[in-house]
Image (spheres, rainbow, N blue to C red):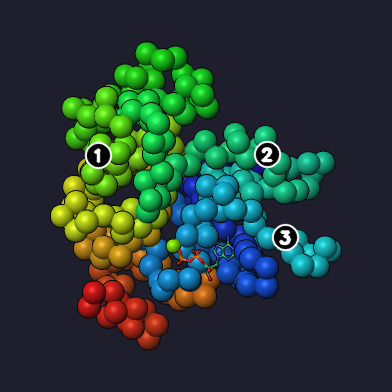
């Protein structure tokens, strides 16, 4: 097995297939992401963006090759098999125990904030630290308070999610994800469910995190200004394949492919 080193990709999709029934959502998808890179995924609804993030969050499993004799696709994280594990010198589909360990490197924030409604803000941010990472209560609380300060919610730690605006709830969700010290942060349309006046607060927090940490980010967003400012690379998807990719300046000002041009025209006209 290779030793993980920092000069190799932090994420690598190697010929990854994903089917839902007869629907082939990802078709032998290959891509890699370097440590510290910020990659924005764009593309029409249904093009497979959320599926890619959910595979990385281990909420979905890769689909094995149809032909049992053929090798199926594999996701690697930090140089190690992630969707799979080594067994007797071969890669086999990872079991639950392996996945539980592996997914600790990855944090995700969803379009819907998904906070625990019966827990106050502080407890939302400490719960997984205590249960999953086995941190002591004091350490977890001090970490939570630091992060709630970063997202501008120090004065709301006793509130319940129902007492917060959508933008505040989403900032708690960001703090909760960061509390687990992930190496990779996945952001799936995190401002799409927010009232327009709340979008900038959330994007501001994410810009700060991008500016002050080296965390690797995969971002799905329709906020093209934000994508341009924070990402190193933009990947355009359609039908589960990469149509084209490049630095945001090039992708937004001179996209080469008609599908990208059409998509950007539609998004920017919204
Ligand atoms: N759990 C599921 N069961 C069946 N089909 C699904 C499921 N999740 C996603 N899909 C389908 O997979 C395709 C890609 O979806 P998704 O990854 O959510 O796209 P995007 O995020 O780019 O809009 C869509 O056609 C969607 O309907
Ligand atoms: Mg989606």
Task: Tell me the tag on residue 64.
Answer: 3
Task: Say which residue appears at 52% left-offset and 47% top-offset.
Answer: 57
Marked residue nearer the N-terminal end (1 or 2)? 2
Residue at which label 2 appears: 96
Mark 1 or mark 3: name the one nearer the start of the chain. 3
Q: Residue furthest bottom?
A: 258
Query: Exactly how many numbered labels are in the figure?
Result: 3
Most foreground residue, 95 or 258 = 95
Identify the residue at horizontal 39%, vertical 20% (top origin).
Answer: 140
Q: Is residue 22 above or below residue 209?
A: below
- Is the residue 130 above or below the residue 83 in the image? above
Crowding at dot 3, Cα within 10 Å, few <14 / some 14-19 / many 20+, comes out as some
**Residues at badges 1 and 3 in contact (C-beta under 8 Å)?**
no
- Foreground of the two, 139 or 241: 139
Residue at disc 2, CB closer than 8 Å to ligand 1: no
Q: Tell me residue 133's x, y (percent).
A: 50, 25
Tell whether 244 sits left or right of 65: left
Q: As displayed, is residue 15 above or below residue 134? A: below
Cβ atoms under marks 1 and 2 closer than 8 Å: no
Residue 196 percent location from the top left of the image = 19, 58
Q: Secondary structure at mark 1?
A: loop
Quote the CA–CA distance across marks 3 and 2.
Answer: 17 Å
Residue at (27, 80) in percent of width and height: 265
- Secondary structure of the residue carrying numbered label 2: helix
Q: Quadrant of the C terminus?
A: bottom left
Instruction: Tell me the mark number nearer the camera, choosing from 1 and 3.
Output: 1
Determine the quadrant in which ligand 2 lies. Answer: bottom left
Q: Indicate which label's residue lies in the foreground, 3 or 2.
A: 2
Residue holding disc 1: 164
Rendering quarter of residue 156: top left
Of label 3 and label 2, which has the lower sequence position? 3
């Amino acid at each position: 097995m290779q030793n993980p080193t920092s000069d190799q990709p932090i994420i690598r999709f190697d010929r990854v297939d994903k089917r839902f029934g007869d629907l082939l959502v990802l078709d032998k998808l290959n891509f890699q992401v370097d440590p510290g890179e910020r990659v924005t995924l764009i593309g029409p609804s249904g093009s497979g963006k959320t599926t890619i993030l959910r595979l990385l969050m281990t909420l979905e499993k890769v689909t094995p090759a149809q032909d049992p004799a053929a090798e199926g696709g594999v996701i690697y994280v930090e140089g190690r098999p992630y969707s799979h594990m080594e067994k007797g010198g071969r890669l086999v589909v990872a079991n639950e125990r392996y996945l539980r360990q592996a997914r600790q490197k990855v944090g995700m924030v969803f379009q819907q904030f998904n906070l625990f409604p019966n827990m106050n803000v502080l407890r939302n941010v400490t719960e997984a630290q205590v249960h999953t990472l086995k941190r002591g209560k004091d350490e977890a609380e001090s970490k939570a308070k630091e992060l709630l300060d970063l997202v501008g919610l120090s004065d709301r730690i006793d509130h319940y999610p129902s007492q917060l605006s959508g933008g505040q709830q989403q900032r708690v969700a960001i703090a909760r994800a960061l509390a687990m010290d992930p190496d990779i942060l996945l952001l799936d349309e995190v401002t799409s469910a927010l009232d327009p006046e709340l979008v900038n607060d959330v994007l501001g927090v994410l810009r700060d995190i991008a500016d002050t940490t080296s965390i690797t980010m995969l971002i799905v967003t329709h906020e093209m200004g934000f994508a341009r400012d924070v990402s190193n690379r933009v990947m355009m998807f359609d039908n589960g394949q990469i149509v084209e990719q490049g630095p945001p300046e090039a992708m937004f000002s001179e996209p080469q492919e008609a599908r990208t041009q059409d998509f950007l025209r539609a998004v920017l006209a919204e």
